[in-house]
Amino acid sequence: MKTVHLKQNWKGFFTYLEAYDTSQQYQKVEFTLEITLSENSFIGISYDLESKDAFNKPATVKGFIEDDKISFVMKYPCYYYKDEKGNIILDPSSEHPDIHYLGFLDENKKYVNGNWEMTVYEEKYADGYLEDIINGEFEMWKVN
């Protein structure tokens, strides 16, 4: 049986909570996703408007589509964060945590909405590391 590789482009946005103080405000960041489907799995790349100028290569994605569910893991080229002034700070010596996306396709398979989550290990203490789970929502739509 011949495997067909199908290229798809998606556009969308993800949201995240900017701060954990009284000014809690959700940020909305636009992104593009370029994937190549093979059977039910896919690989690809992603660019977002917040970090695209900070890196010399895109984030990678790897996932699958099963019925109306889409699941993928996105990984930036290295660890990054925003400082108190909103500047992006890169740490090329550290790996960025995996970002797990889970969404559901509409009946035409052209629109997805769902949630994302990543676990950040912050401080080492006697029994391990302090974990912080960061999450948000996302939406995307097929553009070809």
Image: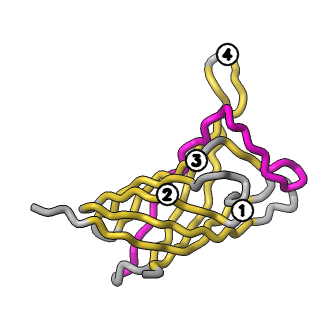
Up/down of 51 relative to 131, above or below: below
Q: Within 10 Å of the Cα at label 1, are there few (<14), some (14-19), or many (20+) other Cα atoms?
A: few
Q: Which residue is mark 1?
A: 50
Of the residues shown, which amino acid type is indicated by label 1? Glu
Is disc 4 placed on a helix, strand or loop?
loop
Q: Which residue is mark 2?
A: 101
Say which of marks 4 and 3 sits in front: 3
Residue 143 horizontal/vertical position (percent): 47, 81
Q: Are marks 1 and 2 in contact (CB under 8 Å)?
A: no
Q: Within 10 Å of the Cα at label 2, are there few (<14), some (14-19), or many (20+) other Cα atoms?
A: many
Q: Which residue is mark 3?
A: 118
Residue 130 horizontal/vertical position (percent): 67, 31
Up/down of 90 relative to 50, above or below: above
Q: Label 4, label 2: how many angstroms apart (C-alpha)?
A: 31 Å
Report the residue at 31% width, 69% height from top.
6
Part of the protein shown in magenta: 82-106
Report the residue at 68% width, 37% height from top.
92
Which quarter of the rendering shows the C terminus?
A: bottom left
Of the residues shown, which amino acid type is indicated by label 4? Ala
Is disc 1 placed on a helix, strand or loop?
loop
